Image (cartoon, rainbow, N blue to C red):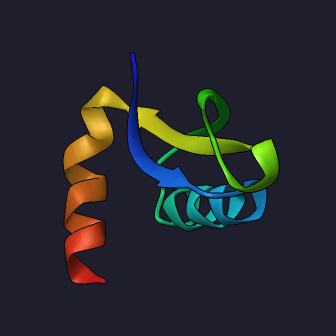
């Protein structure tokens, strides 16, 4: 099961978060959030990780 851990205003930022998480060994996915439009009507993006890895992401974000 995949869980949203970050919301990004655009694809570039979402990919940056995904790369950061994956660089730390946590597989991640990026999906557009069509329910919440961003600037100019473009979708915002959700960054998702496995439910089992949420605690790892929370610790990584706490250290930033």
Q: Is residue 44 left or right of residue 20?
A: right
| Residue 40 pos. (x, y %) | 80, 52
Q: Nearer the viewer, residue 3 or 8?
A: 8
The residue most toward the top is 1
Q: Residue at x 29, y 69 (%)?
A: 61
The residue most toward the front is 40
| Residue 64 pos. (x, y %) | 31, 83
Q: Nearer the viewer, residue 46 or 35?
A: 35
Q: Nearer the viewer, residue 18 or 41?
A: 41
The residue most toward the bottom is 64
Is 19 located above or below residue 28 in the figure? Answer: below
Is 8 located above or below residue 50 in the figure? Answer: below
- Res. 42 in view: no
- Res. 16 in view: yes
Is 20 located above or below residue 6 in the figure? Answer: below
Quadrant for the N terminus in the image: top left
């Amino acid at each position: 099961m995949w869980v949203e851990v970050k919301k990004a205003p655009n694809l570039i930022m979402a990919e940056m978060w995904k790369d950061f998480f994956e660089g730390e060994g946590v597989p991640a996915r990026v999906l557009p959030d069509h329910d919440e439009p961003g600037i100019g009507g473009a979708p915002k993006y959700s960054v998702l990780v496995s439910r089992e890895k949420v605690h790892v992401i929370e610790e990584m974000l706490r250290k930033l």
